[in-house]
Image: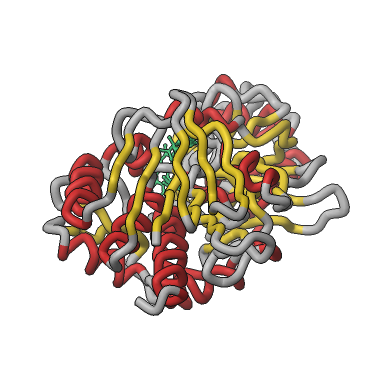
Amino acid sequence: MSVTVIGGGAAGCLAAILLARGGESVTLLEKNARIGRKIYITGKGRCNLTADYPPQEFLGKVVRGEKFLRSAVYGFSPEDTKEFFNAAGVELITERGGRVFPATQKSTTVIDALSREMDLAGVNFVAGAEVLSATVDEGGFSVKTADGREYVSDRLVVATGGKSYPSTGSTGDGYRFAEGFGHTVVKPVPSLAQLITVEDVVALKGLSLKNVTLSAYAPDGKRLASEFGEMLFTDKGLSGPVALSVSARVNRASGVKLSLDLKPALSREKLDARVLRDFSERPNADIQNAMRALLPARLDAFVLKKAGVSPSKKVNSVTKDERGRIVDTLKGLSFTLHSVAPFEEAVVTSGGVTLAELTPACGSRLCDGLYFAGEVIDADALTGGYNMQIAFSTAAAVARDILKKEGR
Ligand SMILES: Cc1cc2nc3c(=O)[nH]c(=O)nc-3n(C[C@H](O)[C@H](O)[C@H](O)COP(=O)(O)OP(=O)(O)OC[C@H]3O[C@@H](n4cnc5c(N)ncnc54)[C@H](O)[C@@H]3O)c2cc1C
């Protein structure tokens, strides 16, 4: 039987390899000149290819599609990804947070391994093949490319990715193909991107913070997200690991308020006592100087301004009410979310082919022989190797299902 795979990213390449190894005649169509243009930029060029956790723990970091992905992740787990790459000659290392990288610290090692395995398995790889349309009739699936060619096959795997970083080739074409087959597409929105604030934070640009908690609230006060860790101010808002994680939980909400706890280890009472102690040690200092022990430079002035206390005020003239406002601001520096940064700078796309119309093996419930794998489906996760693993797990589920249906 013949299979056409559209898209030479993580999902399309693995699906093609496993299908060809199983005896299928596989053609992989990729619009770029090479496979894996997005893989190249993953993990800051080092490619964090999976998250070294057992499936149950892994699924805890999935933002959308946790239930749906169970079968795929158990069927091809992070352990299986490691085994696949080890067998393909790629030595791996696991860093803090279960982040798995090639030992070379180069994403090209992963791309080269996929390319080699595609050749060895006998995948017919067609570079520069931009698919314009995909249809089905009695003769099978017909895929037409921009250079006027037509590819006909018994099965079709759409692995075109999402809309993030469109410069890599992932421009959301798969959504159009899916809709053409009658599928519903959940509105794609950027995820794992910086949080652009209404407030001007340019004065804090480049300042990074450790051990802070960033929370997000809906207009009715419901907490949407709360993340502890590292954060970075940019010229437009908040970035770094905690902001990116929060973005995944607020990208469909409006009127979101953000609250940054700069001292999460201390209760309000303990922090008040600490501020009182600092102040009593330096009664004649400017308040901004007295805050230096608590906060990095630049942030002290920002906090005092938010609290409505003049930075040049002497510590011994600060009222109890003013001290209370400073403590409140330290425990909840507030911002209004303007938006999550656009697809051009979003690590992943949230949304895509609706999961209700797919089998657990990512097969279409509407069109026999049609499959979707990777970021094109409505599933996404936090940073740390989870999104590549979703691409691998769903690709393997597709390959297993097709091979099983053919009794292989
Ligand atoms: C900057 C950045 C860093 C990241 N770092 C990590 C990380 O370290 N770890 C992690 O787990 N995840 C990371 N991700 C996310 C991860 O890369 C993706 O979720 C994953 O690669 C998606 O794989 P995919 O195969 O589904 O889609 P893609 O990798 O997007 O591949 C889709 C392919 O389809 C091709 N295509 C699209 N339309 C057509 C068409 N019409 N015709 C032919 N070909 C087409 C595209 O050119 C592309 O090659 C990162 C993402 C970005 C943007």
Left or right: 322 with respect to 157? right
Residue at point 55%, 55% (across, down): 380
Residue at point 29%, 45% (across, down): 124
Tell me the quarter of the picture where residue 223 sits: bottom right
Spot occupied by residue 232 in the image (x, y as percentages of width and height): 48, 36
Q: Can residue 56 be seen in this view?
A: yes
Q: Quadrant of ligand 1?
A: top left
Nearest the viewer among 285 and 125 is 125
Left or right: 207 with respect to 78? right
Spot occupied by residue 364 in the image (x, y as percentages of width and height): 62, 62
Residue at point 80%, 50% (across, down): 218
Residue furthest to the right in view is: 220
Chosen colour scheme: secondary structure
Spot occupied by residue 302 in the image (x, y as percentages of width and height): 62, 28
Spot occupied by residue 123 in the image (x, y as percentages of width and height): 27, 50
Q: Is residue 279 visible?
A: no
- Image quarter hosting the C terminus: bottom left
- Image quarter hosting the N terminus: bottom left
How many numbered discs sit on the rendered protein?
0
Tell me the quarter of the picture where residue 244 sits: top right
Nearest the viewer among 149 and 189 is 149
